[in-house]
Image (cartoon, rainbow, N blue to C red):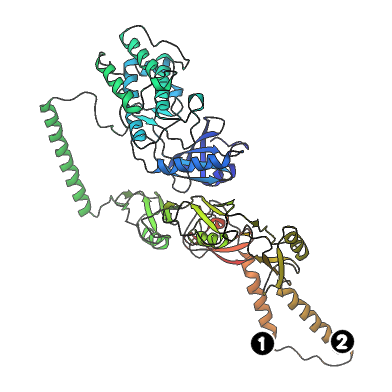
Amino acid sequence: MVTLSPETPGNETLRRRFRVHDERQLSARTTLLEADDTETGDPVRVELFDVGGADGADLTRKFRERLRAFEELGHPVLSSVLSGGMREGTAYAVTEPHHGAWVDDLIGERFQERVSRREALDIVDVLLEALEVLHAQGLVHGHIGPRTVTLADDGGVGLLLLTAPTGPGRDGAVFGPEDDVAAVATLLEAMVTGTDAEGSLAGRDAVGGAISALVARGSDPDPRQRPADAAEYRTLLGQTVRSLPPAEGRHVARVAPADRGTSEGTSPPRRRTLLWAALALVVALVGGAALWALTQQGAEPGGALMPDLVGLSPAEASDLLAELPVALEVTYRDVRSDDVEAGLVTASSPESGRELGEGAEVRLSVAAGPLTVLMPEVVGSLEQDAREALEEEGFTDVEVVQEPSEGLPAGTVTESDPQEGETVPHDAAVVLTVVEGVTVPDLVGGSEQEAVDTLAELGLESRVEDAAESERPSGEVESHTPGPGAVVDEGALVVLVISTGPEEDEEEDAGQEEDTGTEDDREEGQAAAPPTQEHSEEPRQEEQEQAAPCTSGGWSEGATYPEGARVVHEGKEYEAAWWNSESSPSESNEWGPWRPVTSC
């Protein structure tokens, strides 16, 4: 496993969600990670795009536009974009990995050993067919090259979609479909010659000459002389391929590597008929064996069949597994699911119906909440009210951008991204555009005087109120309204709630005074009345109840917690709503496996 360097964007967040195996620097701003998603357990690719700098806001907007557009695509050559958002000033997108090797790792003699020049044209044809889908929807890829194309042993071709905004085309023009065409032409040149140097020749025979002509046409320095888009360039490619002898067949380019059952060439009709008849006989025999196995209670002596646990609570699933005649090693993992209610089993490994032997390992996936949520209506509300509405829906990554606007109070939300009603990933970042004003700082934990002075410097009024209950030392700010980050008009009133000290201190002081009085009475020769049983036990019981929240053990990453278990994490006590093993209490929400109990 590759450990991310401190300079890698989004390092802290990625360590919590992604288990990184490899890292590739694609450009000065873009990094590609090969990783496992700890929420789903699936292998993924994670694109990191640095949006820092003076043009950060514009880059962020373009990134979000491409992310939304690419999430709607579905093509076997184009990598599926699963989710994306913002973390710690870094834009990220999660995509499904394609099988195979990067063309960048194959260019040279290794590529020529696997793929002939003629077959390279078939690979380019597959890429152009995928680009036709993009260009037909007004989209461009913008990052085509040896580092974004994969080639599998079974002929599958993959093209990585990068949500990083495209750079400008030649001479600063807007990047367009004709620039994607030029990138494909350059890639073709690199594949057949082992270099991406401009002006190199593909060869002087028929195949090499045809490739040289295609490369020259597609990469013409004048964009107006290139094919306008992938469809036009693919037409030229088809005309060229039909004029050439067929490939010798070391590698067969395909739309996707999933077509593993198709053999190269075709069988005679009679042979295909015999093959299908044999297959039908095998299926019949397997089906008969399965039926016999079911009548024999489905398992070999000393074994058992995996029951169907989907939709059950972890406790119910655990009870069913415990009733089986074999001892099992059961583990749990938290996943997201739109199909199963939070807290219930979404899947099992092995699947139901599979045979289980003594000591077999069983892994149950438990829903930690939905994969997608609906964006609530927040436009027109105040920024603080909008934050509360978003938190209720499970959104935790909220960014506020201020813009001037006349006729509306400061802090009024004028725009949201995503927009109201959009279905977005549960961890999607939300950008709220609000009317420009004064941002209320976080004053909690500071002294009363410091808070009053800070607000005065910002041009804000303040009013002080005593906290009804507080565990903070006397004189500290317990809370304030509007809260931290709220955008308000200049001169707005901020109410500071100040702690009067923990009640326990007052009870201890009262107890000390009572004890002192008793000693004085004894000095004066008066007999002190023994305390009644009622007064002697209740204070101790209250003290035990107050101390209980702090006696739970600390939360440990990777440990398994059954329903009802309590842990202390970051100064708060949490109770497990259901069996879980990988969710941090600090990231809990109304759908999560942890619910807060009290503060310690």
The image's mark for residue 518 is: none
229 sits to left or right of 514: left
Expressed as whole percent of the image width and height from the top left, the position of residue 316 reads 39, 63
Expressed as whole percent of the image width and height from the top left, the position of residue 397 reads 54, 52
Task: Name the N-terminal-most of marks 2 and 1.
Answer: 2
Q: Find the residue positioned furthest to the front.
A: 407
Circle 1 residue: 534
Query: Which amino acid lies under the numbered mark 2 shown in the image of this protein?
Result: Asp
95 or 225, nearer to the observer:
225
Up-down: is 251 above or below 99?
above
Query: Which amino acid lies under the numbered mark 1 shown in the image of this protein?
Result: Glu
Up-down: is 36 above or below 451?
above
109 sits to left or right of 400: left
Circle 2 residue: 520
Q: Secondary structure at mark 1?
A: helix
Residue 125 in sight = no
Residue drawn at x 56%, y 33% as measured from the top left: 29
Q: Find the residue positioned furthest to the top.
A: 204
Expressed as whole percent of the image width and height from the top left, the position of residue 274 reads 12, 31
47 or 165, nearer to the observer:
165
Q: Assess whether mark 1 and mark 2 are in contact (beta carbons under 8 angstroms).
A: no
Expressed as whole percent of the image width and height from the top left, the position of residue 221 reads 45, 18
C-alpha separation, residue under disc 2 versus residue under disc 1: 24 Å
293 sits to left or right of 50: left
Mark 1, Cα crowd under 10 Å, few <14 / some 14-19 / many 20+, is few
Q: Secondary structure at mark 2?
A: helix
